[in-house]
Amino acid sequence: MQIRDLGEFGLIERLNGMVTQGRRGPDNGAAHGFRLLVDTGDDTAAWAAAPATELFTTDTVVEGIHFTRETTPWQDLGWKSLASNISDIAAMGGLPLYALITLGLPPETEVSDIEDLYRGMLEIGEEYGVSIIGGDIVGSPVAFITVALTGVRSGPPMLRSSAQIGDQVAVTGYVGSSGGGLRLMLEGSEVPGESAVYLRNAHRRPWPAVAEGQTLSRAGVLTAMDVSDGLSDDLSKLCLASGVAARIFSGNVPMHPYLRQVFPDNCLDLALNGGEDYLLLFTASEEVMQKVIPALPDGAGVLGEICSGDPGQITLVGADGHETAMGRAGWDHFSQGCAR
Ligand SMILES: [Mg+2]
């Protein structure tokens, strides 16, 4: 059945049923003193808030620009479209709470595809304690999904703009795995075994670093952002916001053994420029780093340092000490040739 047969109201009713009956995960809101007063189905959602710092973010993905049906099945797309927002909440050291979902859909869209999309959102919502509490559906010549997500934390959030010269630069896990998985799928490479499964899953089902964000915050880290567009590009943004430059030591960039195995010649390029890893990039003093790195997952480690220089300038230092100025090679929404 296509959505033109079911109609807007029929589709909304079906999705409302899914989100209210499909909520099984932890309730982050209740755990932090928030209470949902009006659920999906009325003019707006409403909740009673607790004294806390509230966070609010949004992100849109458009078919043909941010995803294709060939590399991202609908259920994975649901997971990922919520994951990118959860990751932005994680970057502030917050817990995600409530989501609104806006869908733009061509009338010939299959209803079962949209149910799959919502299944993916419910799956990740269950893992991270996110409740979908409303949304909107509009007709559109291309499919797009906008997620708006609230979050909460006690105290001030971590920022991009507070990096200091002399800070070390670190990530909370291996970088480049998602980019490697995407490249495998785009090239249609038949790489057998565990390594390909790991890389494809890294791209299709990323796990935002909410727990890691809280760990960083508790350890006194003040400066963080999530890696969504690629390590070098995101570090450049962090440096620009802080008015500093940075050096990355190529030998210290954490890459999963499977990424090195499948892409022996371009794993570093994927680690620096592949996007959608959804882990956290952060800076702190050496003292804080020594305390926090052992509390983070495999792969977490220091890969560079903040230095003086043109704000946003990133320099890659090779194993032989040779220095290369990095171009902004990650995702730029308005440049050409990056569609994926
Ligand atoms: Mg972000």
Image: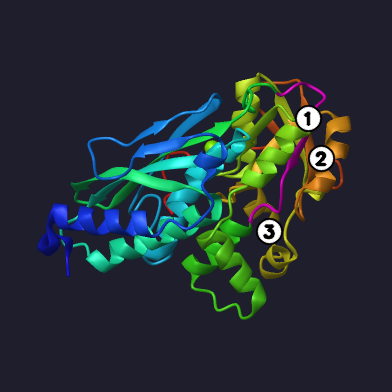
Q: Tell me: is circle 2 under 8 Å from ligand 1.
A: no
- Whichever of labels 2 and 1 marks the residue nearer the N terminus, that label is 1
Q: Is residue 174 magenta?
A: yes
Q: Tell me the element at label 3.
A: helix
Q: Is residue 138 above or below residue 118?
A: above
Q: Which residue is mark 1?
A: 284
Q: Tell me the element at label 1.
A: strand
Q: Circles 2 and 1: CB distance less than 8 Å?
A: yes
Q: Tell me: is circle 1 under 8 Å from ligand 1.
A: no
* Left or right: 205 in relation to 282: left
Instruction: Point out residue 102 in the picture as x, y percentages from the top left corner.
Output: 30, 44
The kind of residue tagged 3 is: Cys
Magenta stretch, overall SS: loop
The kind of residue tagged 2 is: Val
Instruction: Point out residue 255 in the picture as x, y percentages from the top left corner.
Output: 73, 56
The kind of residue tagged 1 is: Ala
* Left or right: 7 in relation to 294: left
Q: Is residue 266 magenta?
A: no
Q: Give the number of the mark in front: 1 or 3.
A: 1
Q: Quadrant of residue 170?
A: top right
Stretch of the chain drawn in magenta: 163-176
At a point 69% along the width and 28% down the height, the residue shown is 223
- Whichever of labels 1 and 3 marks the residue nearer the N terminus, that label is 3
Q: Which residue is mark 2?
A: 292
- Whichever of labels 3 and 2 marks the residue nearer the N terminus, that label is 3
Q: Nearer the viewer, residue 47 or 103?
A: 47
Disc on res. 267: 3
Q: Nearer the viewer, residue 55 or 131?
A: 131
